[in-house]
Amino acid sequence: MMGVGKSTIGKLLSTTMKINFVDTDEQVEKHFNMPINNIFDKHGEKGFREIESLILEQSTNSIVACGGGIVLKKKNRDFIKQNGKCLLLLSKINVLADRLRSENNRPLLKDVIIEDQLEQIWKERKDLYYNLADQIIEINNKSKKQITDCIIGVL
């Protein structure tokens, strides 16, 4: 789910565990040489998702922070299941909304009430997230270090 801290925690894990880190959103931006909002405007969500899938497939032997929508394609879910462990970081919608309010690079949150949109996205994706997850990590009221330590403990 967007805003949960996948990139932040992934970088910490990468440093701690000395494993390569890949942020699929960041790599898609590099591929197109533009921010995500512009990618969605120019190439649509479909164009974004196509490159996101290619980046995922090239990201073996790494800690990967996937964009929240990566689960929408079955081939991505299959790849994740076959090639690694999937950890679902869970947070309350109101906490995510507070984090995301200050960001302006979330095309799915443009011109909407953030809480309502997050609820809708969660409703559409939660079964995909739960079915894909090897482990669920509740992150509310936990420090980055606590979350990282928890993840290392389950790996």
Image (tube, grey):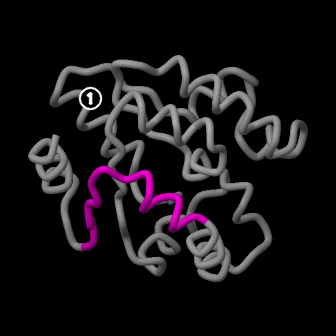
Q: Nearer the viewer, residue 92 or 69?
A: 69
Q: Which residue appears at 51% of the width and 68% of the height?
A: 126
Q: Position of residue 54 (x, y in %)?
A: 64, 23
Q: Nearer the viewer, residue 22 or 73?
A: 73
Q: Which residue appears at 14% of the width and 47% of the height?
A: 154
Residue 142, image quadrant = bottom left
- Residue 107 within the segment the image draws in magenta: no
Q: Position of residue 43 (x, y in %)?
A: 87, 37
Horizontal arrangement in the rendering, residue 19 relative to residue 120 (left or right)? left
Residue 115, image quadrant = bottom right
Which quadrant is the C terminus positioned in?
Answer: top left
Horizontal arrangement in the rendering, residue 18 relative to residue 57 (left or right)? left
Residue 118, image quadrant = bottom right
In this picture, is 130 found above or below 112? Answer: above
Type of amino acid under label 1: Ser
In this picture, is 112 found above or below 137? Answer: below
* Disc 1: which residue: 14
Q: Nearer the viewer, residue 116 or 104?
A: 116
- Residue 138 within the segment the image draws in magenta: yes
Q: Position of residue 34 (x, y in %)?
A: 75, 30
Q: Which residue appears at 64% of the width and 32% of the height?
A: 52
Bounds of the magenta segment: 125-140
Q: Crowding at label 1, few (<14), some or many (≥20) Cα neighbours within 10 Å?
A: some
User: SS at mark 1?
Assistant: helix
In this picture, is 27 found above or below 142? Answer: above
Q: Which residue appears at 80% of the width and 38% of the height?
A: 39
Q: Position of residue 17 (x, y in %)?
A: 17, 27
Counting every numbered tag in the picture gives 1
Horizontal arrangement in the rendering, residue 112 relative to residue 104 (left or right)? right
**Outermost residue toward the right in this view:** 42
